[in-house]
Image (cartoon, rainbow, N blue to C red):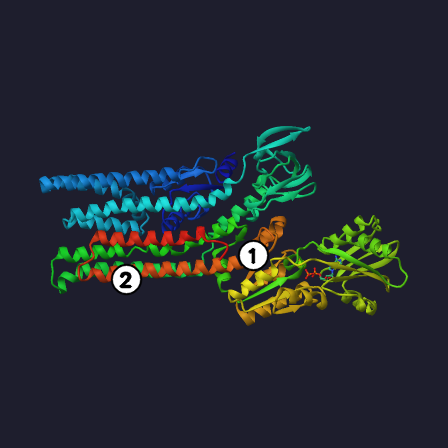
Amino acid sequence: MQDTQSMQTLKWREKTLHVDGLDCASCARELQEVICRLDNVGECSLTYATGKLHLRYQGSLDKIKNLVKAHGYQLRESHEEEKGDAVAAQRVKQAAWAALFLLLAVVASAFYQPLSIPFLLVTIIVGGQTTFRRAWQALLQRRLDMNVLMTTAVIGAIIIGEWWEGSVVAFLFAASNALETYTTEKNRRSIRTLMREMPEAAHKLVEGIPETVNVATIADGDLILVRPGEQVPLDGVVIDGVSWINEAAITGEAMPQNKEQGSRVYAGTLNGNGSLTVRVTGTWQDSTLTKIVRLVEEAQEHRVPLEQFVDRFARVYTPVVMLLAAAVAVMGPLTQNGTWGEWIYKGLALLLVACPCSLVLAAPVTVVAALTNAARQGVLIKGGVFLEAMGTVQAILFDKTGTLTKGEPEVKQIYAAGDFPEDEVLAVAAGLEAHSEHLLARAVRQKAEELGIKPLLTTGFTAIAGKGIQGVINDKFYLVGSLAYLNENGIATEELQQLPQRGETVIAVACEKRLLGALLIKDSVRKEGAPVIEALRQLGIKSMQMLTGDRQQAAAALGIELGLDRVRAELLPQDKEKTVRQMTETWGQVAMVGDGINDAPALAAATVGIAMGAAGSPTALETADVALMGDDLTNLPYLIRLGRQATAVIRQNIVLSLLIKTIAILLVFPGWLSLWLAIVADMGASLLVTLNGMRLLTFKKKA
Ligand code: ADP
Ligand code: MG
């Protein structure tokens, strides 16, 4: 009995909560540490950009709630209404009250100087309360953070009789807190708007009759009705009806897509004029949109290299400036001219300068804005690292089928060897391809259906990646695949050399050791292909190459048409990977663009692996570093420009912060840096850094 009870209290739970009102990146990191240190918390991670708190904990949440509250934020469960705006409003109110009392102090001082002191004291208490409370929390945990620095500065100012200075500083805390809460909440909201695209109700078909229910109650395999003008509530496959759907929420492409029986539809997309019956695939938690939002959020957690540099710097910078402040306050009056009051004042000003706030903000705000901008274009970047890497990529490798071509191959010609009937060639090929997932297989099946030819029943099917397929029909062994594949199996294919070739892929068909014929398949080139390659060249990409398992002749024609530097043909999946590694040695940073399924090893080997058409392929979405949800190559130049712009903005932010800090430190010594100026400098720098980073929210896709 006792045992089961202790077992129960030991039970670990996992939960995602929200912290509303987080207003600085370093505070988020500190709060995370404090929560992690609680006895009943196993794991925790708090993401500044979204305010999401992932917890593994035992017992009740009360302790955690109180702790968050003590730091001046609000803890909220996922289903509760967000309080970010409320927190921001509260901060604004605090600042307004502080301003009012400061004003009263000014008025009072006009009549009788000492009369202003009570007003100044109230200003300090009202304006500084959040900071003081956090400072107290930090001291309880024996930590020195920016709040402690600021509180020390205010108390110090009071002690040396600088009441006015102290209260102006406290008012400025309140103002900067309000401003930062407001701007970060705004930034955070732009990520949440992605999630807002998700409708909450769905019309479930129960024995053919629509019933409006919450999406959370719908299961895999249920039928739902999507009426004209409504949002699709869950991912699924159309089983009845025709319509146009705007998929911008997923792919960033606003041009409506035609949907009919068998088409995939995605949660969050907007239905046009038709009514659709959809068979749901997976719950709303499995939906592509939910995955996108989760991945965008997770992307914030990986820090970019520049950010790691900043963190290391801040860890040295703050204690050094604090020591300097102490030295100035103590050593100054002993060795130099001037009173204790004057030197302590200088020391306090330095304490304020020691805060690394704007520096810590430099990267995360920018990265969040850039990732959000990309997500709106249907480009999913799995972390700031890849964003930065895209900006410095030297070479880009492309898969052919489905990447540079439309991925809608068609059989253009059927060739029969000797007097073997053409229809037989197709019947055999379609029979084997019935088992294959390959894009080419679809073309073969389609042709057979179009000509009304019945595929022959195949057993013992095997696929050899990058080569072809084999199987048994009527006790005979058949091969379908590349010429090289047939040659390997001892089948002569000289006869096929004379076939006209204008970029077609030749698929040979053989029975036992005899060549039966071939299919010429053509997949048209994406029309944006050549302009995109040209745009990439303009952006300074040094080498662009095609990697394909197809034959040299077919690939070469395409390479010339697109303006590529080189075409590497007849590669097996592992050869593609090896090529990527070689290219990485030559060029340093290499991006590989592929369809994400049979190109997975090559995508993984590249500095940045980019998957096309990821909306339709969950594996590609999970494995790639960058997922292009739509099939749009024009996102490549955009990605490179975005990566470069983001890196530039982060650098600007770092330089700006350091510059302002340096100037502030230099101004201390001639006694020109007043306490309030020190705060204004810091506040100004934080604000500039935030606004500069947020510019990326409106970065345009077209140059
Ligand atoms: P890519 O590199 O263009 O994506 P793959 O590596 O998938 O092409 O395939 C390379 C070649 O192998 C194809 O051009 C084709 O000749 C042959 N092949 C692969 N799979 C099949 C299949 N299912 N049916 C016929 N041929 C195939
Ligand atoms: Mg491919």
Left or right: 62 in relation to 386: left
- Please tell me in which quadrant of the rendered image residue 666 appears: bottom left
Q: Tell me residue 13's x, y (percent).
A: 50, 41
Secondary structure of residue under mark 1: loop
Q: Nearer the viewer, residue 227 or 157?
A: 227
Q: Is residue 690 above or below residue 229?
A: below
Residue 651 at x, y = what percent? 39, 61
User: Which three-letter amino acid code belongs to the residue tagged 2?
Assistant: Thr
Q: Secondary structure at mark 2?
A: helix
Residue 218 appearing in the image: yes
Residue 318's tag is: none
Total labels: the figure holds 2
Q: Nearer the viewer, mark 1 or mark 2?
A: 1
N-terminal-most mark, 1 or 2: 1
Q: Is residue 537 left or right of residue 549?
A: left
Q: Which residue is mark 2?
A: 662
Q: Residue at x 26, y 39 (%)?
A: 96
Q: Which residue is mark 1?
A: 634
Furthest residue to the bottom? 586
Residue at the location (83% across, 48% down)? Answer: 452
